[in-house]
Amino acid sequence: MAAMTRLSSKGQVVIPKEFRDAMDWRPGDELIVTTTESGILLRSARREAGGLRLEDLRGFIGYKGPSISTEELCRPVDYGAHDEEPEQGLR
């Protein structure tokens, strides 16, 4: 993703909405500004501090299968249910 923006006379830069949305940056969020060999890097201070919210983790694993009920998810796992002999180290 790339976009062009302009530096204002006050030293301000508008970060395009598509970038703010992709990074989940909201008005008032603090950003860490770092110089690099190729320019400037912006990082979320919230994420650097480990301040992740639950919604930051939604979809993190990227499961593409059918929905699983809470009851099914919490059901104990029987590693040997389908094997004649359980694999070593699993019991």
Image (cartoon, rainbow, N blue to C red):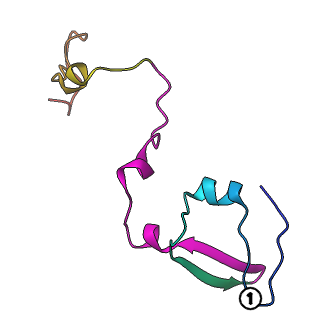
| Left or right: 58 in relation to 73 | right
Q: Is residue 23 left or right of residue 82?
A: right
- 42 and 82: which one is in front? 42
The answer to which image quadrant residue 40 occupies is bottom right
Q: In the rendered image, which quarter is residue 46 located in?
A: bottom left
Q: Is residue 24 magenta?
A: no
Q: Estimate the x, y position of residue 65 in percent, counting from the top left.
A: 46, 21
Q: What x and y, as percent, mark residue 14?
A: 73, 72
- Would you say residue 58 sits in the magenta stretch? yes
Magenta region: which residues? Answer: 37-65
Q: Secondary structure at mark 1?
A: loop
Look at label 1 and name its amino acid: Gly
**Residue at image point 61% right, 82% down:** 33
Q: Nearer the viewer, residue 80 or 7?
A: 7
Task: Give the residue at x 51% y 73%.
Answer: 28
Please report the residue visible at 15 percent of the width from the left and 23 percent of the height from the top: 76
In which quadrant will I find the C terminus?
top left
Q: Is residue 35 left or right of residue 84?
A: right
Q: Nearer the viewer, residue 3 or 41?
A: 3
Q: Residues within 10 Å of mark 1 (few under 14, many from 20)?
A: few
The residue at the far bottom in this view is: 10
The N terminus lies in quadrant: bottom right
| Mark count | 1
Q: Is residue 34 above or below residue 45?
A: below
Relative image position of residue 66 (x, y in whole percent)? 43, 17
Q: At which x and y percent is residue 85?
A: 19, 15
Determine which residue is flagged by label 1.
Answer: 11
Residue drawn at point x = 82 percent, y = 71 percent: 5
